Image (tube, rainbow, N blue to C red):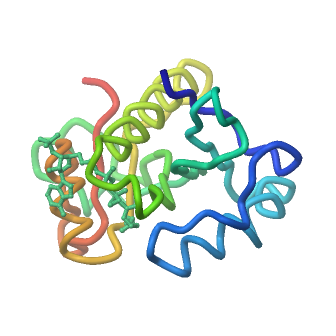
């Protein structure tokens, strides 16, 4: 059974991670630890406990906000007009040689679970993602994310009703 852990550079081998997108590889090996220290984003990795240093995939979470005007009519009607608190999954990636095996789905599930736990302490309306292209957008829509009005590559998933 795979496990999701907070990134620990002393344990997790970030240098060999390859998802096929160099910006996402570089982020893990060069910026993730620094960003955690500076409060920019928290990185979580997916590993097999039988090979705990091998990063199979990762996602990042940060606090965020979204303009109510960017939400669908139905969501907007239920919310105040000032910026709405959210969480942002800024990055999501799986090893290229393990793509298409359901790891992306596992990572989204882990991220949503963390957000649900966190919103018990600090309110948040939705999990927001920025899709890097139309393919990533379709992937997120497959999981129920809704594109923002006028910003179709930014999508959100309400965390409760
Ligand atoms: C995007 C990414 C994280 C998806 O992870 P993955 O492990 O390959 O995807 P999964 O195997 O979990 O796919 C789960 C489901 O999403 C669907 N899916 C995958 N890619 C899709 C796409 N482009 N459009 C629509 N659905 C898609 C799959 O068909 C599958 O559906 P099913 O369970 O009904 O069969 C992975 O491909 C990746 O790391 N890509 C490179 C980095 C990247 O593009 N990150 C996104 C940045 S915004």
Locate the C terminus and report the quarter of the image it occupies: top left
Residue 118, percent across and down? 58, 27
Residue 129 to residue 76: above or below:
below
Say which residue appears at 18% left-offset and 67% top-offset: 149
Say which residue appears at 49% left-offset and 32% top-offset: 115
Residue 125 to residue 38: above or below:
above
Left or right side of 78 for 28: right
In this view of the protein, which residue sits in the foreground, 10 or 33? Answer: 10
* Residue at far bottom of view: 22
Residue 122 to residue 62: above or below:
above
Residue 8, percent across and down? 80, 44
Q: Quadrant of residue 47?
A: top right
The number of callouts visible is 0
* Residue at far front of view: 50
| Residue 131 shows in this picture | yes
Left or right side of 77 for 23: right
In this view of the protein, which residue sits in the foreground, 94 or 119? Answer: 94
Say which residue appears at 20% left-offset and 70% top-offset: 135
Q: Quadrant of residue 41?
A: bottom right
Say which residue appears at 50% left-offset and 61% top-offset: 91
Q: Quadrant of ligand 1?
A: bottom left
Left or right side of 78 for 86: right
| Residue 92 shows in this picture | no
Residue 37, percent across and down? 86, 54
């Amino acid at each position: 059974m795979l496990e999701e852990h907070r990134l620990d550079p002393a344990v997790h081998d970030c240098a060999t991670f390859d998802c096929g997108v160099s910006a996402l590889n570089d982020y893990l090996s060069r910026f993730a630890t620094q960003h955690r220290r500076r409060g920019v984003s928290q990185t979580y990795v997916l590993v097999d406990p039988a090979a705990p240093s091998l990063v199979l995939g990762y996602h990042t979470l940060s606090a965020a906000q979204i303009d109510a005007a960017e939400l669908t009519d139905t969501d907007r009607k239920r919310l105040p007009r000032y910026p709405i608190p959210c969480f942002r999954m800024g990055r999501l990636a799986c090893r290229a040689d393990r793509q298409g095996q359901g790891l992306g789905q596992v990572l989204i599930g882990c991220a949503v679970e963390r957000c649900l736990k966190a919103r018990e302490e600090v309110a948040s309306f939705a999990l927001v993602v920025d899709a890097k292209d139309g393919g990533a957008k379709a992937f997120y829509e497959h999981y129920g994310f809704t594109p923002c009005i006028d910003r179709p590559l930014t999508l959100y998933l309400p965390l409760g009703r």
